[in-house]
Amino acid sequence: MKKIQLKKPDIKGFFQKAKNLKKDDIKQWWKAKRERRQLILEQRRNSKLAKMMQPVYRIMNRFSLVFHALLACILNFAIELISRHSLIAAWEYMVQTPKVFLFNAYLIFATFAIVYLVRRRMFARIIISVFWLVLGISNGYLLLKRVTPFNAQDLKVLSDATALISNYFAPGELVLLIIGIVAVLLWVVSMWRRGGQYTGKMHRVLGIVGVVAAFAGYAVLTGIAVDQRVVSNYFGNIAFAYEDYGFPYCFTASVFNTGISEPAGYSEATIDEISNDGALTKSESGRSQEELPNIMFVQLESFFDPTEVEWLQFSEDPIPNLRALFNEYSSGYFKVPSVGAGTANTEFEVLTGMNLRFFGPGEYPYKTVLKDNVSESAATALASLGYGTEALHNNGGNFYSRAKVFNHMGFDHFTSKEFMNILQTTPKGWATDDVLIPNIMESMDTTEQQDFVFTVSVQGHGDYPEEKVFQNPAVVVSGVEDEGRRNAWEYYINEVHEMDEFAGNLIKAVESRNEPTVIVFYGDHLPTLDLQAKDLKSKYLYNTNYVIWDNMGLQKEDRNVPTYQIMADVFDRLDIHSGTVFNYHQERRQTQDYLSDLELLQYDILYGKQYVYKDSGEPITEGHLVMGVKDVNLTEVVEQMNGTYSLYGENLTKWSKVYVNGEKQNSTYLNNTRVELPDTKLKDGDIIEVSQVGSSNTVFRTSAQYEYKKGKLTEVPGTLQNLTLDEISGEKKVEKKTDTKTDDSQSTDAATDADTAAGTENTEGTENTGDADMAADDNTTDAAVPAN
């Protein structure tokens, strides 16, 4: 066997040459390099492959536009094939909606105009083709893990990609991904080295004009397509929109069409006219301070009246409590902005009074403008009248960036699942809504004055399993022939039945307080159960139901209300006139130019110069929200026989993380009064504290510090601070450690904070945005949390 001889590097000689290097030597080196490069190119041009490809290149250059059009159609079909995971589905999309298919193909075709700006045209075509295929493959893969397509929000969290990789990729998949990326890169580099060059005269000015014309043509074509209803610039359900309007258009729209574009006619004078010279910013009520009631809004996940479905039949009324409310109190259809998904967008319209149709298609203001900017809302409107403002959600505090958004909306407190002792979950792992009642009562107890309480439930969340879950359901469903669909409906109906019980029990709890109160119950959107308009009595997929309960004797006034008008409507019934947008609805709802002026007002408040506030001042300049309303209090720590420690206290939850001298400890949650510390070793002088930690290791609230000495705990004076979210930055991260999880922890967090976790499918369409805020990291073993 021949031995390999390794030549010893001549380091001394290298530095000697470098020392004696002259300017002419450098020129000669560059000249020799160029000559070698020209020789290599000449050899390639004269190679067999080059000569064989020359006729192909000539044809492609002569008929390049035709070639680009054909390639665009092929790429578009390939993208839809990958996205829909079905050759038949992709074919049906192309054949049944040819205008939509060709419209998307034109977008891809327009990008090929860039080819005419470079000599390496073949290489440019390869790069553009790979770009579109990578987008299509990304979308197809994500749709295997979740129901939300690949969109602009995913691009915004690329910096957190390492934190999300474990949610999307199994180890084997990750290895294949790396191999695939390396292979594609090697192939692309190879094609750059081997690809031919255009040898004709370059017309770069004409090429630039062509690129501009191609994309301008797409803009014009988009306007025509929207006008002719080939596509839409409003996505009621982003997942459905991608299926109906194609991936290239929808993805591009999600990237470039966000926020509210400046409307025609926007000026200070126009806003002065709309606001009646600032009169809309007033905050007043015809009721005295003592007469003002508590105002509660309860958003019921995926709720609507099941009897609205024409063909569904039930062994008994699934919603007897709400049915009685419908008959006795003001109620009607609730026109929501989305179908089958979009919880946060319904919240947005309810809380701000703003219409989502003026935003980009498929946009979630919770994930865009409100994530980083303050805005007036129902919370600021009622706070100006002396109300305490509370928000609650039995899901993760970072879900939909709610902690940040509620802070920017001016809420006083936000109690998320991290502060709840969740004992019951649905078979799909969502917290049941009964846990909300004691937490609502505790939130109201934090203030002496009237309260505005905004509650978001989660129990009705999908997906809805097609296998039978309940052996003895409270409500038996019939009227559905397919067994799988019948099982899915029966699961949903029985969850709604329990949500109805929650509504009845909440009213009982409120009545026991003997305080004037108004409660608005409403559904955020229809469930994802393949409903069509023809299946519903209202023949409209954007209708859910609402009812306004009160103990004040308000007159029953039934009417159908859009989401963005409900808050103003309730305020008007209570003789409350506060909040710029709510006042606008009350005064202008039946007037000419109502919607166009609303768009101008929304733009001014969120994106414009805020002319409307020039005299009154902004209703909110910074947030002051505190997470939760209860502190963890530690009472004692007990050393067990095996050397481990048990930490006892009050208000502990599954999301309570223990720190010793600032270092996070492995812990096992047993119940709301006890946490085990299996690996901790304590010594006199150690400082112990407990933080409530959300997804992405976000610290929401921290207890006082306790000094450990001689087996006892002593609270360190002055260490309980109750910091606002801004004060703890909302970005404070805790040190990650690898702890053990039980199945219960996985079911709760994988189903809530990390919709995108591998193996978890969430029917709440765009709640699965892939945002790093939703990456779960529960480093606690949950030993005793009973399931429903």
Image (spheres, helix red, strand yellow):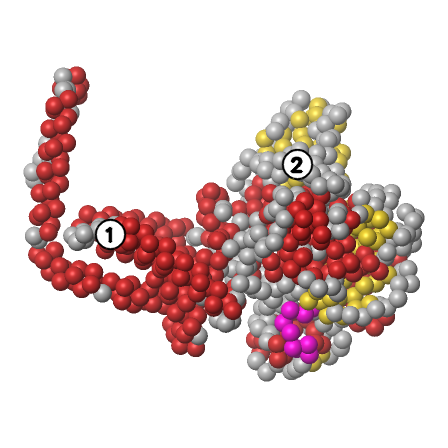
Mark 1 surroundings: few (<14), some (14-19) or many (≥20) residues within 10 A: few
Where does residue 77 sit, x and y in percent of width and height? 36, 68
Picture quadrant where residue 344 is located: bottom right
What residue sits 86% from the left and 44% below the top? Answer: 449
Task: Residue lying at the far front in this picture: please name it.
Answer: 269
Picture quadrant where residue 456 is located: bottom right
Whether the residues at callouts 2 and 1 have beta carbons within 8 Å, the answer is no
Q: Secondary structure at mark 1?
A: loop
From the image, which quarter does the C terminus lie in? bottom right
The stretch of residues the image draws in magenta is 536-545
Query: Would you place residue 20 above or below residue 28 in this image?
Result: above
**Pointer 2: what residue?**
726
What residue sits 82% from the left and 42% below the top? Answer: 446
The CA distance from mark 2 to mark 1 is: 55 Å
Where does residue 367 sit, x and y in percent of width and height? 58, 50
**Pointer 1: what residue?**
203
What residue sits 57% from the left and 36% below the top? Answer: 733
Q: Secondary structure at mark 2?
A: loop
